[in-house]
Amino acid sequence: MKEGIHPNYREVLFVDLSNGFKFVTRSCVSTKEMGKTDDGRELPLYKLDTSSESHPFYTGTQKSVSDMGGRVEKFRNRFGIKK
């Protein structure tokens, strides 16, 4: 392997800003801040707007197309194939 061409691959603390969920994984992301994990380790900190803990698709709070209150049927009636 060549020296000096590989990114800095290390453990990084990711924090979901919407609910405070924290997780540690290995990443090459560049950070300027440091954060403490629950077990007291000091790691580079990367802040996320959303994660699997807060995203509507993964939490089950996303509305499906069938729950659109008749908008799908209205669209089909308006633009659907005419017989």
Image: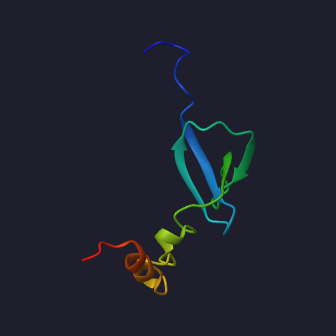
Please tell me whether residue 83 is drawn above or below residue 28 in the rendered image: below
Quadrant that contains the C terminus: bottom left
What residue appears at the point 47 percent right and 77 percent down from the top-left corner? 60
What residue appears at the point 40 percent right and 82 percent down from the top-left corner? 73
Please tell me whether residue 4 is drawn above or below residue 66 in the rendered image: above
Please tell me whether residue 60 is drawn above or below residue 2 in the rendered image: below
* Location of residue 53 in the rendering, given as x and y in whole percent from the top left corner: 55, 68
Q: Tell which residue pokes out farthest to the bottom in this image.
A: 69
* Location of residue 79 in the rendering, given as x and y in whole percent from the top left corner: 39, 71
Camera-nearest residue between 27 and 11? 27
Camera-nearest residue between 66 and 16? 66
Camera-nearest residue between 73 and 10? 73
Q: Tell which residue pokes out farthest to the right in this image.
A: 33
* Location of residue 32 in the rendering, given as x and y in whole percent from the top left corner: 74, 39
Left or right: residue 70 compared with residue 37: left
Q: Tell which residue pokes out farthest to the left in this image.
A: 83
Quadrant that contains the N terminus: top left
What residue appears at the point 50 percent right and 74 percent down from the top-left corner? 59
Left or right: residue 71 compared with residue 32: left
Please tell me whether residue 46 is drawn above or below residue 66 in the rendered image: above
Residue 50, by quadrant, is bottom right
